[in-house]
Amino acid sequence: MKKSTLSLTLLVAAALFFTVSQTLVGTTDSNSSSALSDYTHGTWEINFEQALARAKAENKPMLLDFTGSDWCGWCIRLDKEVFSQPEFMTYAADSLVLVELDFPRSKKQSAEIKAQNKALAKKYSIRGYPTIVLLTAEGELIARTGYKRGGAENYVAHIKEILAGS
């Protein structure tokens, strides 16, 4: 009896993991029209056009995170020290539209996501990772920045300073 319960638990866990992992990489199935459809990664959008429409509707600036989430040490550090912290998430929820533009080496992405991210990297002349681009609600460039030491509170102050000067 214990073996069958364990087997069933492992099967359910594997199915759940597969379903979640397929959703996170932006794959499509026969019921969806595009990998760029309504998808957010937590509070991070991956569809730039959808994020821009939201920024306009909410009259909020956009923070674009050009990242190599599975290989770039500074990107991983920025996410761990800043973006995943409650201080940043609280500020961002009220003040920003967050967009993750990922350039992973191991994670799978759909062709649409890859093409979108490549085009945006070219448009904003991205030369390294992480690069943070701040845009107005209309999509106009405010500033570029990157990793800053000091944790989430310091980074929020940094972003506020940039936005206050725009």
Image: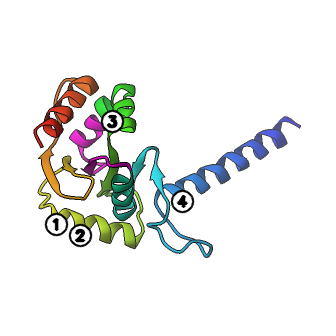
Q: Residue at x 31, y 55 (%)?
A: 102
Q: In which quarter of the image is the N terminus?
A: top right
Q: Name the residue under label 3.
A: 83
Q: Please tell me whether residue 63 belongs to the stretch shown in magenta.
A: yes
Which numbered dot is residue 22?
4
Name the amino acid type tagged 4. Answer: Gln
Residue nearer the viewer, 144 or 61: 61
Residue nearer the viewer, 35 or 55: 55
Could you say where residue 53 lies in the image, as x and y percent from the top left? 37, 60
Q: Name the residue under label 2.
A: 119
Tell me: residue 119, above or below residue 142. below
Which mark is first along the chain, 4 or 2? 4
Q: Name the residue under label 1.
A: 123
Badge 2 marks a residue whose secondary structure is: helix
Q: Please tell me whether residue 148 belongs to the stretch shown in magenta.
A: no
Mark 4 and mark 3 residues within 8 Å of each other at the beta carbon: no
Q: Of circles 4 and 3, which is in front?
A: 3
Q: Residue furthest right?
A: 1
> Real-space Cα distance between discs 2 and 4?
23 Å
> Real-space Cα distance between discs 4 and 3?
23 Å
